[in-house]
Amino acid sequence: MDLEELESLRKQAKERIEKINNEREWIDTKAYYLGKKGIIPSLLSKLPKLTQEEKKIYGQSVNTLKVFIEELLEQQLKTIKEREIEKKLSQTTIDITLPGKFEIRSGTVHPISQVIDEIIDIFTGMGFEVAEGPELESDYYNFEALNIPEEHPAREMQDTFYISDGFLLRTHTSPVQIRVMEKREPPLHVICPGKVYRRDSDITHSPMFHQVEGFVVDRDIHFGHLKGVLTEFLRRLYGENIGVRFRPSYFPFTEPSAEVDIQCVVCNGKGCRVCKNSGWLEVLGCGMIHPYLFSVVGYDKEIYSGFAFGLGVERLTMLKYAIDDIRLFYENNLSFLEQF
Ligand code: PHE
């Protein structure tokens, strides 16, 4: 066995190993060269028959060949495995841009939230800002500060959920008037949307519903401002041609007070079941802020005046979309909600 032979063996091995393309072949090839009865061990088995000098050169050369083959095999194994991964990846490609088999439902904004957003848009467009107050309210803010003392009959008008001594679920958003005025100085143009609670439940009443409070305090504010702002608001919500009228009414925290009606949206004022044949529908309460409230928050009633209003969002929404049962808003029935 001469060194030339080793060299041709080296070339052969390189060619053969680089052609391997699966693990089975790789194992066979490894056995062919390095296995117990493989080429390398058989070359080494000839060593004892050689002279000391030959042993050294020949032994070293075989060893170099052995290391060469081992490294080549390792390298090839890596290549095979990489190729396999590539192959698997290319076979299992998924096109994530393909449309799915199932319809993916996306939610819509709840009709109550839509109308609140619309109301906010209209008023912020007129220069109002938005404020909020707590739903768990004290007797003081919900009643006392609004000129509704302990024995006042107006407390009976609003069936209150009492929580504990002195605390309740607010029955209207009017307490936010006090909370804002207490902290700030006029001029104020504020609306306060939010949830309110009353012990009441039928097809037009829900124990929880939404109101939007609004108020303006500045010098020289008069009833004309109130009429102008609310008429404009209702026209934007229900259309240019909606009929609007103001009727005298009573609230302890406004003086004078009024209720506002719009022409019946169902019969256009002719008279029907919805408007109880009157042709009109009440949509909000309002009035000039009672001077008592100014004394509570420390405003000078000789300098400032203001108006306030409160509207029920569910009622406005029911009228806008001809919905006859308030409970539909809270049942999460998709065939109802998807119409909005
Ligand atoms: N808070 C009154 C209610 O809930 C509505 C209202 C607000 C009336 C502001 C006048 C002024 O019925």
Image (spheres, rainbow, N blue to C red):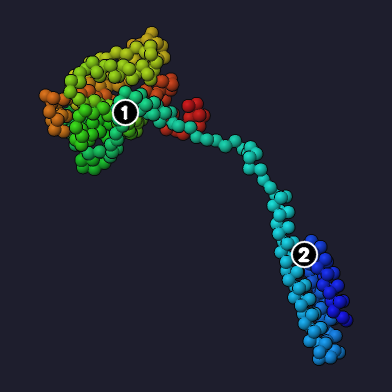
Marks 1 and 2, the one that precedes in the sequence: 2
Amino acid type indicated by mark 1: Val
Q: Residue at x 31, y 23 (%)?
A: 126
At 25% from the left and 38% from the top, the residue drawn is 137
Residue 212 tag number: 1
Instruction: Where is residue 37? Give x, y as percent.
Output: 84, 79
With respect to residue 308, does 297 lie above or below? below
Residue furthest top as drawn: 270
Q: Is residue 80 left or right of residue 45?
A: left
The extreme bottom residue here reads 52
Label 2: element kind = helix
Category of crowding for the residue at label 1, using alpha-carbon neighbours closer than 10 angstroms: few (below 14), some (14–19), many (at least 20): many
What's under tag 2, amino acid-wise? Glu
Residue 192 x %, y %: 30, 31
**What SS does tag 1 mark?**
strand
Eye-nearest disc, 1 or 2: 2
Q: Quadrant of the N terminus?
A: bottom right
Task: Say whether residue 308 is left or right of residue 109.
Answer: left
Q: Is residue 279 above or below residue 101?
A: above
Q: Which residue is mark 2?
A: 23
Does residue 125 appear in this view? yes
Q: Position of residue 136 (x, y in %)?
A: 28, 39
The answer to which of 244 and 278 lies nearer the viewer is 244
Residue 282 visible in rendering: no
